[in-house]
Image (cartoon, grey):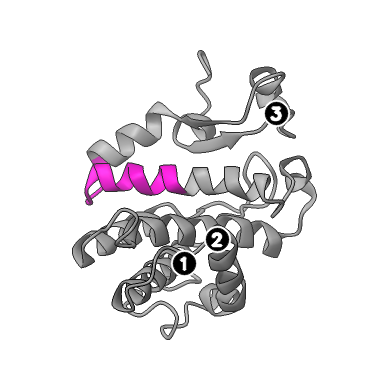
Amino acid sequence: LGGVENPALTLNALTLFPGTGLPQLAPYTEGQPTFIVFGDGILQFVAEYSSIDAYLGMDFILGHEFCHVLQEDLGFYVPADLPTLDLVTKEWIELMCDAMSAYYLAHPFGGNLTLEEVDHISLHAMTLGDGFEEDSIGTSFHGTPGQRECASIWGAMQALSDAYNWTATESFSEVADKFSSAYWEILEGNSTVCPGIITDVDCY
């Protein structure tokens, strides 16, 4: 996106779909396949200002964005409809991708992260909660830092459970169904679904 200097885009990573509903991005997506964009601001933040491993941070972000590609392909949501969806649905879409990224990174047949590395990605998720009531789409909807931390812990815990039982990675749809069942507890930061959470889910 040469020439784009808006911090909402440069300090961000996003998945751009053909015909996206964001007017400021339409010129870049018309006639193009779905692609993932990393702003130089988010790269700089992870590399210089984050207290966690930069490579793990970028892996987590990439996993989150790739989840959006799968959500579209598997019919979990239609990107063009995103601006009109209610807040709960938007948060469900975004927090699912935090959980999915953590699940596949932590799974022994995926990223095979250590427990210390799992802690790192949950801390990374926590640093990226929405801090504003409004964003370029409308109401901020990625979840609070605590909710994002909880979602990533939940995803990693599913992977560790699979590892304990020597179970291969589950399909995207299977993990998504489990996530949906735990969704309201994740929103509340219930320690039974995200043990070890350190952030108040109501805190931005």
Quadrant position of residue 115: bottom left
**Residue picked out by circle 3:** 18
Q: Secondary structure at mark 3?
A: loop
Does the magenta segment cover residue 36?
Answer: no
User: Are the two marked residues, 1 and 2, in contact with CB atoms closer than 8 angstroms?
Assistant: yes
Task: Identify the residue at horizontal 47%, vertical 71% (top origin).
Answer: 201
Q: Check disc 2: other Cα within 10 Å, few if <14, some if 14-19, many if 20+.
A: many
* Side of 84 where 53 appears, left or right: left
User: Are the two marked residues, 3 and 1, in contact with CB atoms closer than 8 angstroms?
Assistant: no
Task: Identify the residue at horizontal 33%, vertical 78% (top origin).
Answer: 165
Q: Position of residue 167 (x, y in %)?
A: 38, 71
Q: Secondary structure at mark 1?
A: helix
Q: Position of residue 193 (x, y in %)?
A: 45, 80
Q: Position of residue 6 (x, y in %)?
A: 53, 27
SS assignment for the magenta stretch, majority: helix
Does the magenta segment cover residue 57?
Answer: yes
Q: How many marks?
A: 3
Instruction: Indicate which disc residue 96 carries.
Output: 2
Real-space CA distance between mark 3 and mark 1, rounded to the nearest whole angstrom: 28 Å
Judging depth in this view, the residue of 192 and 204 nearest the camera is 192
Q: Which residues are magenta?
A: 49-63
| Mark 3 vs 2, N-terminal side | 3
Residue type of the residue flagged with mark 2: Met
Q: Residue furthest bottom?
A: 192
| Mark 1 vs 2, N-terminal side | 2
Q: Residue furthest top?
A: 3
Judging depth in this view, the residue of 87 and 175 nearest the camera is 175
**Residue picked out by circle 1:** 151
Residue type of the residue flagged with mark 3: Pro
Q: Secondary structure at mark 2?
A: helix
